[in-house]
Each structure stands twice: as C-alpha cells, then as structure tokens.
Amino acid sequence: MAIKTEARPEGTDIVHAQAGTIKRSGSIQVVVFSLGNEQFAIDLFDVKEVVEYTNITKLPNVPPYVKGIIDLRGEITTIIDLKHRLNIAATGTDTLDTSRIIVLDSAITRSKTGILVDDVTSVSTFDEEQVDYTSASVSNDDTAIIGIIKRKVKVQDKETNELIIWIDIKRLLGDIDSGL
C-alpha cells in the first residue's frame, strides 16, 4: 500500500496509515469561533488577523453569502457570511457587538477576503489525538469538514467533551474565490 505524503506543520508525524485513514501525532493550532450555537475552527495559518465588525457595503448581483465589502486600512476586502454559506440558521440572539471578521491569509484566496462570524472565542492548540477524522467522512464530500475536535471542559464538576467542527476554509471558499 502506498502512503501519500503530505505537507504538514513541523512537529507533526504520521504514526500509522491503514485503509486510507491517517492518524497523526503532534499538535494543531486553530482559531475557534462561534456560528449560531456551534463552535467551529479553522487553521491558524489560514488567518491573517481578526477585526471587529464594521459597516459592510452591500454589492449588487452577488451570491447571497457575499455580505459585501469593507475598506480595511485602504484595501477593499470582500466579506463572506460564513453562517449563510454553511446554511446555519440565525439564533435570534445574534448581535453585531460580538461579531468579528476573520481576515484570511492572501495565500489561500485570490482576492482580499474576510469571513463574518458571530464571535471568535479563542486561539487554541490541540493534540492530534483530540481530533476525530472519521466523523467528517459521515457528511457530504462538499462540506469541507476536516474533523471534529474534542475539547475537555468541566461543567458542574463533570468532565465532558465540547465538540468543535474543524473546517478547511480554503476548500469551502474555493468556489466563491473563483466566482469573484
């Protein structure tokens, strides 16, 4: 069986490859944010910066998930409503006070792009063992889910797992970037 080599962050080693699944050791760094009632994460190296919500200028004749554009320090930045792109219903408690724009690294998009999220909760490092890659295969191939991160949290003296959906933002926005 041939093992496909892949580029990975320093310190990440492939430990085991069997039947197409790869288990890795090492750590991942992600930006964790909320959309509705769920927690999501994207790779830290795909993020340039996080900025507070600002007035977004709407554009005519664009897909509904394109919220509009902003002027970010003299550069026009296209804003994608990630909640709309992922078909996540509004919770009714959404507020622009906590909304953030995650500006993506120019290496993953052709044009300056930001994603609108409800809130950025943390920048975190997780061990690869905390990621369940098999759960991602249950959903559609076009969802761009890399895996499910299990973060241990204590709630009233009980330890439980909080699930964070780790998405491949480059894959998710690939079709958007080609259309803009």
Image: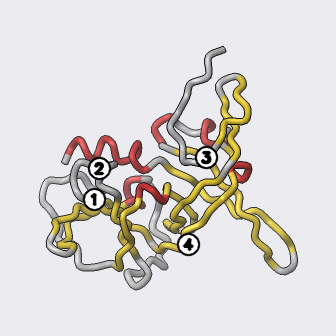
Q: Which residue is mark 4?
A: 122
At 49% from the left and 79% from the top, the residue drawn is 93
- Going by the image, does 169 lie left or right of 28? left
What's the residue type where badge 2 is placed?
Answer: Thr
| Residue placed under numbered mark 2 in the picture | 109
Q: On the image, numbered disc 3 is attached to which residue?
A: 147
Q: Answer above or below: position of 99 versus 166.
A: below
Q: Residue at x 40, y 46 (%)?
A: 172
Residue 18 x %, y %: 72, 25
- Asked whether the beta carbons under mark 1 and mark 4 sit within 8 Å of each other, the answer is no
Q: CA distance from mark 2 to mark 3?
A: 22 Å
Question: Residue 127 placed where, x, y %?
Answer: 69, 55
Q: Are marks 2 and 1 in contact (CB under 8 Å)?
A: yes
Which residue in the rendered view is the most extreme toward the front? 10
- First in sequence, mark 3 or 1: give its number: 1
For residue 143, above or below residue 162? above
Q: Position of residue 151 (x, y in %)?
A: 71, 63
Rounded to the nearest angstrom, the CA distance separating label 1 from label 4 is 21 Å
What is the spatial separation of the Cα atoms under label 2 and label 4, in whole angstroms?
23 Å
Q: Which residue is located at x 66 percent, y 59 percent?
A: 126
Looking at the image, do the residues carrying marks 3 and 1 touch, with CB atoms under 8 Å apart? no
Whole-number angstrom distance, CA of label 3 to CA of label 1? 24 Å
The circle drawn on residue 113 is 1
